[in-house]
Amino acid sequence: MQEQFGEPGRLAGQPDRAGEVVPTAGGHDPADSAGPRESADDAARTALDAASRGLSVAAIDAHDLAFGTSRWSSKLVHGGLRYLASGQVGVAHESAVERGVLMERTAPHLVRAQPFVMPLTALVPRRNAALAEAGLRAGDLLRAVAGTARGTLPRPRRLSAVETLRAAPGLRGHGLRGGLCSWDGRLVDDARLVTAIARTAAGHGARVLTRTRALSVTGTGALVRDELTGQETRIRARMVINATGVWAGRLVEDIRLRPSRGTHLVLRAESLSGLHTGLHIPVPGETSRFVLVVPQDDGRVYVGLTDEPVDGPVPDVPEAPESDIGFLLDILGTVLDTPVRRHDVVGAFAGLRPLLDTSHGVGAAGPRTSDLSRRHAVVTSREGVVTVVGGKLTTYRRMAQDAVDAALAARHLAARPGRGTARLPLVGAASRASLATLSAPRRLIERYGTEASAIHALGEREPRLRAPVADGLGTTRAELLWAVRHEGALDASDLLDRRTRVGLVPADRAAALDAAHEALAAAARPATGI
């Protein structure tokens, strides 16, 4: 599959010539679809949907792939249980369907089943426990209605206190009545999902342009700036989709959002007695809010998340405030035998949700951000720019589909039928049976799928590439070289913060920085035998 990533400075000196910036399909002169964005991740997804329909696509990204909100997620592919509890049946069903699509068809190498235990402590009233158990069974019914196989997601069940402690040894045994075990989808890495989507879109003819900022958009094009050279050019297009997430209001003034901050902690597994099972910890006083504890295969554990409104300018990279960190540690402490202290937190990250503002008028308070719907919305401006906002990582494919449908309708255009992204495997995807036959380490297969063998071969040819990027880390130097040569990485931040997630722990990032610079230098030399 031939991928098309834009090169630094590619736009320079090419004003008003979309055919030279975006390869044109179907004999059209202007590009059919442009996806300008500012540090968001929805453009790659929209680009894949449009490109799979045979449209010419320019996906414009002000920074790098996965620079925006997606890399700050809980790394979960939810089945929508929370939305079912709040009466949002449509959102819950959509989430369950899209979870099944990811786990069984489009990205089985990146998503796997994760068990979770909800400990039934003295802080969980028996009525709440009964409601939670009924909700889990309703969620399992939703799984069946969505068509996800039982072998993909086992059924939920109630655990005794002994079984609960066996699943999560670090829990406090005193007062523990038992637990509720359930299963959901867990991403190996949310940023790798975005990269796979972008590469799949590029393989279907989309031009993916990073470090290219959309300065302004209309229904027929976008003024963009190459962030590396400073030069500007105009892309003509038949359709323009504003897929900039929480930054959507910068390009289309009519879009009103209420950003919500979700903060996560990064812990070492040993801080939680080597926890391998996820936890759902009820937030006291709330009926459908939980703190999630999500173990990772690399020995880290993510704990999140908060849901706090954000006022004022939206930063490119949000910071996790100490108040959020303290809140998460307090909730975690309600179930653990040995509390986790502030010094055990080796990293923290925060992302912003682009929730639609449903308040009326200036100064209207509106509902809490935690109560706002996660259903996505597609809005067409007077100028014909289609904006997609809201939603969540699990439902990215449906969001992109609805956005392209709306853009086609707004411009009275038709696209030839494509394969449909619900049946389109992402780069690296294959059945679990096929993945099991690959000759490569399990860790590489779970992150790269069918490409794991090629990355493993780099280390076979050059043994130094088999070495980890730093002591104690699983990421190899071969992965960094692969990211530069095949995944559009341009600098050390791309390598450590997005193509790999070494950077989620600042100390690990500092230790791996030399390896990142070595990979960039090696990639600049002519490739041998690759």
Image (cartoon, grey):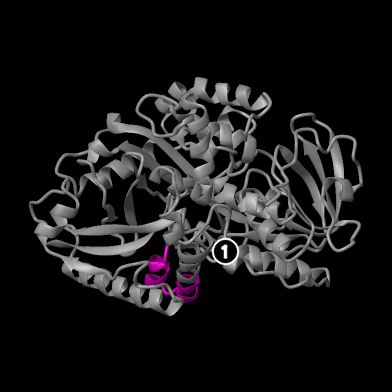
Q: Position of residue 50 (x, y in %)?
A: 72, 62
* Residue 256 quadrant: bottom right
Q: Position of residue 219 (x, y in %)?
A: 83, 59
Is 89 a magenta residue?
yes
- Observer-nearest of 327 and 473: 473
- Observer-nearest of 341 and 529: 529
In the rendered image, the quadrant that contains the C terminus is: top right
Kind of residue indicated by mark 1 = Thr
Q: In the visual, does 72 lie left or right of 282? A: right
Q: In the visual, does 98 lie left or right of 208? A: left
Residue 117 in view (yes/no): yes
Q: Which residue is at a point 76% across and 66% down the rendered structure image? A: 407
Query: The residue tagged with tag 1: helix, strand or loop?
Result: loop
- Observer-nearest of 312 and 58: 58
Q: Position of residue 445 (x, y in %)?
A: 45, 48
* Residue 241 quadrant: bottom right
Q: In the visual, does 413 lie left or right of 477? A: right
* Residue 473 quadrant: top left
Residue 318 in view (yes/no): no
- Observer-nearest of 193 and 133: 193
Q: Which residue is at a point 42% across and 66% down the rendered structure image? A: 79
Bounds of the magenta span? Answer: 78-94
Q: Is residue 289 above or below residue 133?
A: above
Name the residue carrying label 1.
358
Q: In the visual, does 335 lie left or right of 47? A: left
Is 92 a magenta residue?
yes
